């Protein structure tokens, strides 16, 4: 099959789905982009990424695909169960689905691939995660990400299908580590934003990010993942981007919280998803069930639910007994 005979289906036309449709089109594939409220076929600019013109080989549709070479699921993680359940009814068995969601399901604390194992049993699946602001990927600026599957040859095949000269993909088989890193970095980014918004300084932010790596690595290992994954694109890579880049919705939400705005006010003024807000309590529940200590993630969760003030949170983290690194 030539590269141009391929069909990549993208489910979800938010910022990230729109960007992934653009990068998939750059591989030479034909792309269908599923939208809840589809626009007319001649509309070439979508609301979540204004200023980005969709390539001619991207076709926007309101119909789920029945056939494709691979499918990217790019919806907010809290809707992954509902959307994948509907998708499963039309998609031919055996077609691989790659989740691009970053977060844990509220209530169950399940990682996206565990949700798909329930809604799409038996289907080959993988996860895509890395330091990737949608707008830059859509513009074709250089970026890289990890594509992980429990089946490494499948991960390598899928990575080769999405790889291009602007979007470089690395294969992995550490699905627990990659998914957990992608979920947790959103919570850590809220914490990093709070540090900056409250004027606590860049030293504090660097310390918070670094100690969070240790926390996430412990959790990843408890779930059967590898601590070394945290040194990769889905770990430190995405923490660097999301905990320092003003383009991050989670980090900017944290900054506003640190400046004293209430979570309710901030969320009311936004239309885009900040996955860390609902993932934070789900991560705490997961850590408790695995008996893993996650003081930073727990503190951010308490700040979000206003169980702690910023002053109390600062004391709680800094007054912990000294330990070895
Ligand atoms: N924006 C980014 O730079 C990146 C986002 N991600 C992840 O991708 C996922 C999606 O994020 P974005 O595209 O940025 O979100 P977004 O906030 O830009 O858009 C979300 C989209 O999902 C749709 N949607 C909401 N509820 C739905 C439902 N019940 N059924 C179907 N569609 C529904 C909305 O209409 C909207 O188009 C998140 O898990 C995010 O963490 C990952 C990497 C980069
Ligand atoms: O996942 C992202 C970058 O890798 C996007 O981060 P935000 O969801 O915080 O904007």
Image (tube, rainbow, N blue to C red):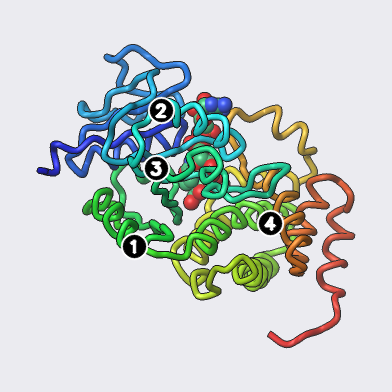
| Label 2 environment density (alpha carbons within 10 Å; few <14, some 14–19, many ≥20) | few
Quadrant for the C terminus in the image: bottom right
Q: Look at mark 2 in the image and give the residue it sits on.
A: 50
Residue at position x 36%, y 29% from top?
Answer: 51
Q: Look at mark 3 in the image and give the residue it sits on.
A: 97
Q: Residue 196 carries which label?
A: 4
Q: Look at mark 1 in the image and give the residue it sits on.
A: 170
- The nearer-to-camera label among 2 and 3 is 3
Q: Quadrant of residue 211?
A: bottom right
**Relative to 175, 212 lies left or right:** right
- The nearer-to-camera label among 4 and 3 is 3
The span from disc 2 to disc 4 (Cα, nearest Å) is 28 Å
Residue at position x 65%, y 47% from top?
Answer: 276
**Relative to 28, 294 lies left or right:** right
State which tag comes first along the sequence, 4 or 3: 3
Quadrant for the N terminus in the image: top left
Q: Quadrant of residue 201?
A: bottom right
| Label 3 environment density (alpha carbons within 10 Å; few <14, some 14–19, many ≥20) | many
């Amino acid at each position: 099959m030539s590269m141009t005979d391929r069909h990549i289906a993208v489910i979800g036309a938010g910022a990230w789905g729109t960007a992934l449709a653009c990068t998939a089109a750059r591989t030479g594939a034909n792309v269908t982009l599923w939208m809840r409220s589809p626009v007319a076929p001649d509309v070439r600019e979508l609301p979540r990424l204004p200023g980005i013109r969709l390539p001619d080989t991207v076709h926007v549709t309101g119909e789920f695909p029945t056939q494709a070479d691979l499918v990217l699921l790019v919806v907010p993680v809290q809707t992954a169960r509902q959307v994948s359940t509907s998708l499963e009814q039309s998609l031919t068995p055996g077609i691989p689905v790659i989740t691009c969601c970053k977060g844990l399901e509220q209530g169950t604390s399940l990682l996206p691939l565990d949700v798909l194992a329930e809604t799409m049993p038996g289907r080959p699946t993988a996860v895509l995660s890395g330091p990737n602001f949608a707008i830059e990927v859509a513009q074709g600026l250089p970026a890289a990400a990890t594509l992980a599957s429990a089946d490494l040859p499948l991960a390598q095949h899928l990575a080769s299908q999405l790889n291009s000269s602007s979007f470089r993909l690395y294969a992995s088989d550490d699905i627990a580590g990659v998914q957990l890193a992608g979920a947790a970095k959103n919570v850590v980014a809220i914490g990093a934003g709070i540090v900056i918004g409250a004027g606590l300084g860049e030293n504090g932010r660097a310390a918070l990010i670094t100690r969070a790596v240790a926390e996430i690595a412990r959790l990843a290992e408890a779930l059967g993942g590898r601590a070394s994954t945290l040194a990769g694109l889905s770990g430190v890579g995405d923490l660097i981007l999301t905990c320092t880049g003003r383009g991050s919705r989670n980090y900017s939400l944290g900054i506003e919280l640190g400046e004293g705005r209430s979570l309710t006010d901030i969320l009311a003024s936004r239309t885009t998803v900040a996955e860390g807000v609902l993932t934070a309590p789900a991560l705490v529940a997961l850590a408790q069930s695995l008996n893993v200590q996650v003081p930073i993630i727990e503190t951010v969760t308490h700040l979000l639910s206003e169980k702690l003030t910023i002053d109390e949170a600062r004391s709680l983290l800094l007054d912990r007994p000294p330990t070895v690194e």
